[in-house]
C-alpha cells in the first residue's frame, strides 16, 4: 500500500500539481486504502457511500474527483465513480458505539504501555482529527488546550478535559517525557498519521472489535454524538470540531439504522 501511494504522489508532483492538490489527492487514496485495502468494484462503491455519509455534497464530490485520479493511475479506470449530487443518508451506520469504545479503552488501560490508551482517550475526549492529534505536545497538555490553525489562518482551540489532562501529565512524568511531542514511535520520533491508523487497527483486532470501526474519525464521531447527547448545542459543537457550516455538523444529530429500528419498534403501535 505504501508503495503505490508513494508512486502516486511522485507522479502528481511530476505533473506539477500544487502542493494542496497533491495533498488532497493523496488523502483520498490513503483514506480508501486504509479502510478497504483492495481496489475492487464493491469496495469502490462502498467508499462512495462512505464519502456521501461523512461529507457534504461538495466535499464528497471533491474527494471523488481526487479518488478517480488515483484509480486512473492504478490502472483501475473501469471503477471510476460518477460525479453526482450526493445525498447524505438519513441515518448513520458502521459507527463505533459508546459501549465498544468503553470496552476498547478498558482493554488498552490494562496494557503496560499506556500510549494507545491515551491516544484513544484523547481522540474521543476532544474530537480532534488525526492530523491534529499528532501535534499535541507536553506544553499543550500543561496549558489544557491545543491551538490549531485551520484554513484561512483561522484559529481553533481544542480543549482537554481536566481528568484527561491530569492522567496524561502523570503518564508523561512516568515516561520521562518533559517536553515536545507526546506520542512517539519506537525510534522516539513523533508518530505518523499512518502509524496511528495501523496501531488502532492492530489494537482493535486484539480486543475483538471490528477494526473497520476503529479508525481515527470514529472517535471524532463519538465525541460529537456524546456532546450533543449531553449538551445539545450544535453551534458550539461546530466550533469545537472546526466546521465552517452547521450542515456538516448536523449529521451527528442522526441516529444509526439500528437506533431508528428500535425507536420504531417502541413507538409505532398503530
Image: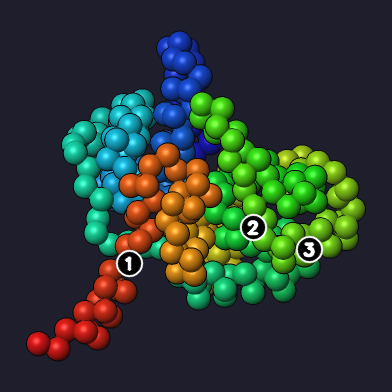
- Left or right, residue 31 beside residue 254: right
Which residue is tagged 3? 166
Q: How is the image coloured?
A: rainbow
Residue at horizontal 14%, vertical 88%? 269
CA distance separating discs 1 and 2: 24 Å
The reply to whether discs 1 and 3 touch (Cβ–Cβ < 8 Å) is no
Residue at horizontal 67%, vertical 55%? 160
Quick one: label 2, few (<14), some, or many (20+) residues within 10 Å?
many
Counting residues from the start of the chain, the first of labels 2 and 3 encountered is 2
Quick one: label 1, few (<14), some, or many (20+) residues within 10 Å?
some
Which residue is tagged 2? 122
What element does badge 1 sit on?
Answer: loop
Query: Which residue occupies the foreground of this view, 121 or 229?
Result: 229
Residue at horizontal 64%, vertical 74%? 106
Instruction: Tell me, yes or no, if residue 241 can be seen here.
Output: no
- The relative height of residue 214 versus residue 207 in the rendered view (above or below) is above
What element does badge 3 sit on?
Answer: helix
Q: Position of residue 18 (x, y in %)?
A: 47, 16
- The relative height of residue 238 versus residue 79 in the rendered view (above or below) is below
Query: Which residue occupies the foreground of this view, 221 or 270?
Result: 270
Counting residues from the start of the chain, the first of labels 1 and 3 encountered is 3
Q: Which mark is residue 127?
A: none
Q: Which mark is residue 255?
A: 1
Residue at horizontal 45%, vertical 69%? 229
Amino acid at each position: 500500500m505504501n508503495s503505490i501511494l508513494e508512486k502516486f504522489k511522485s507522479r502528481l508532483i511530476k505533473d506539477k500539481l500544487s502542493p494542496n492538490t497533491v495533498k488532497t489527492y493523496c488523502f483520498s487514496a490513503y483514506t480508501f486504502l486504509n479502510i478497504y485495502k483492495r481496489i475492487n468494484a464493491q469496495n469502490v462503491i462502498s467508499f462512495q457511500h462512505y464519502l456521501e455519509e461523512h461529507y457534504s455534497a461538495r466535499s464528497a464530490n471533491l474527494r471523488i474527483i481526487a479518488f478517480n485520479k488515483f484509480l486512473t493511475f492504478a490502472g483501475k479506470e473501469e471503477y471510476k465513480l460518477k460525479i453526482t449530487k450526493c445525498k447524505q443518508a438519513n441515518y448513520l451506520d458502521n459507527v463505533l458505539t459508546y459501549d465498544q469504545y468503553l470496552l476498547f479503552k478498558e482493554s488498552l488501560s490494562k496494557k503496560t504501555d499506556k500510549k494507545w490508551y491515551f491516544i484513544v482517550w484523547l481522540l474521543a475526549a476532544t474530537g480532534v482529527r488525526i492530523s491534529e492529534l499528532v501535534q499535541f505536545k507536553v506544553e499543550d497538555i500543561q496549558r489544557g488546550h491545543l491551538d490549531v490553525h485551520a484554513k484561512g489562518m483561522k484559529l481553533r482551540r481544542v480543549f482537554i478535559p481536566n481528568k484527561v489532562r491530569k492522567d496524561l501529565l502523570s503518564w508523561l512524568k512516568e515516561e520521562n517525557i518533559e517536553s515536545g511531542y507526546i506520542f512517539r514511535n519506537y525510534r522516539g520520533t513523533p508518530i505518523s498519521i499512518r502509524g496511528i491508523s495501523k496501531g488502532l487497527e492492530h489494537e482493535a483486532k486484539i480486543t475483538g472489535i471490528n477494526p473497520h470501526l476503529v479508525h481515527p474519525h470514529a472517535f471524532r464521531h463519538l465525541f460529537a454524538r456524546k456532546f450533543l447527547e449531553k449538551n445539545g448545542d450544535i453551534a458550539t459543537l461546530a466550533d469545537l470540531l472546526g466546521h465552517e457550516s452547521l450542515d456538516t455538523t448536523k449529521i451527528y444529530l442522526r441516529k444509526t439504522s439500528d437506533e431508528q429500528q428500535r425507536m420504531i419498534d417502541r413507538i409505532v403501535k398503530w
